[in-house]
């Protein structure tokens, strides 16, 4: 099998996306969920078995993950009123995913641990630290509170040039590495 560094880098980016989605999903469940599972219609296990029965079609089984995670992200981003029901469906999807794909060794790590390890690795390559980023975010927050939106924008742009994307949410400013989404 011919596997290049590019293949590993791409796999890391995909897993990063998957694990970030799982984190968002778990947070959504914690906010809006109860202990009820709501049946989902994705037929995750059935499609996985069909893919694997087709000459051990792990590539198709992996490709199915993109459809599942796209659907999950759409659910998370929807503004439907029945958030408890959505949380139940998300919980059901996560259970089906982890139960089904563990045979390939996927989703066995703690999502937060995986995401933090990938971020740390890339920050090191970029000669940045978590403390640097937190400091700049705090400076930006202070600038915004003081009405210095020009400085706040400049801090955001400087971070963006370094490969750090900021997003303001109700819970505060969060950051991510743009390189992991290219």
Image (cartoon, helix red, strand yellow):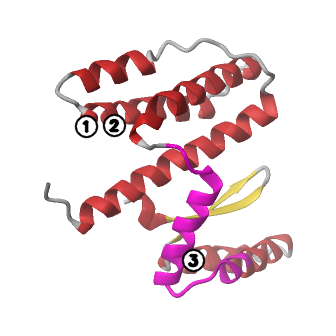
Q: Which SS type dominates the magenta stretch?
A: helix
At 64% across and 43% down in the image, what residue appears?
24
Front residue of 149/174: it is: 174
- Which residue occupies the extreme right position in the image? 146
Q: Quadrant of residue 181?
A: bottom left
Q: Which residues are magenta?
A: 107-134
The secondary element bearing badge 1 is classed as helix
180 horizontally vs 94: left or right? left
Mark 2 crowd level (few <14, some 14–19, many ≥20, 10 Å Cα): some
Q: Position of residue 154 (x, y in %)?
A: 62, 79
Residue 42 vs residue 25: left or right?
A: left
Q: Residues within 10 Å of mark 3 (few under 14, many from 20)?
A: some
Task: Please say if the residues under marks 2 and 3 sit with CB atoms less than 8 Å apart.
Answer: no
* Residues at marks 2 and 1 touching, judged by CB atoms closer than 8 Å: yes
Tell me the SS state at disc 3. helix
What quarter of the picture does the C terminus occupy? bottom left
Distance in Å between CA atoms under marks 2 and 3: 33 Å
- For the residues marked 1 and 3, what is the alpha-carbon distance in whole angstroms? 36 Å
Residue carrying label 1 = 59
Query: Comparing marks 2 and 3, which lies closer to the viewer?
Result: 2
Q: Position of residue 159 (x, y in %)?
A: 57, 77
Q: Is residue 139 left or right of residue 92?
A: right
- Which numbered disc, 1 or 3, marks the residue that appears first in the sequence? 1
| Residue 159's disc number | 3
Locate residue 69 relative to residue 174 in the image: left or right: left
> Where is the N terminus found, in terms of image quarters?
bottom left
Q: Which residue is disc 2 drawn over?
A: 62
């Amino acid at each position: 099998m011919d596997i290049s560094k590019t293949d590993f880098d791409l796999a890391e980016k995909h897993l990063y996306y998957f694990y970030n989605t799982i984190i968002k999903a778990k947070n959504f469940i914690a906010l809006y969920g109860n202990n009820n599972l709501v049946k989902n219609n994705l037929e995750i296990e059935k499609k996985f078995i069909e893919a694997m029965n087709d000459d051990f079609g792990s590539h198709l089984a992996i490709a199915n993950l993109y459809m599942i995670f796209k659907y999950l992200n759409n659910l998370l981003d929807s503004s439907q009123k029945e958030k408890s029901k959505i949380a139940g469906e998300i919980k059901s999807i996560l259970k089906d995913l982890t139960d089904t794909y563990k045979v390939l060794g996927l989703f066995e790590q703690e999502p937060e641990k995986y995401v933090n390890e990938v971020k740390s690795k890339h920050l090191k390559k970029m000669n940045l630290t978590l403390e640097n980023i937190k400091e700049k975010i705090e400076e930006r927050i202070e600038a915004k509170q003081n009405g210095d939106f020009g400085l706040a924008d400049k801090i955001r742009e400087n971070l963006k040039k370094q490969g750090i994307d900021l997003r303001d949410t109700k819970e505060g400013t969060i950051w991510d590495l743009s390189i992991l989404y290219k």
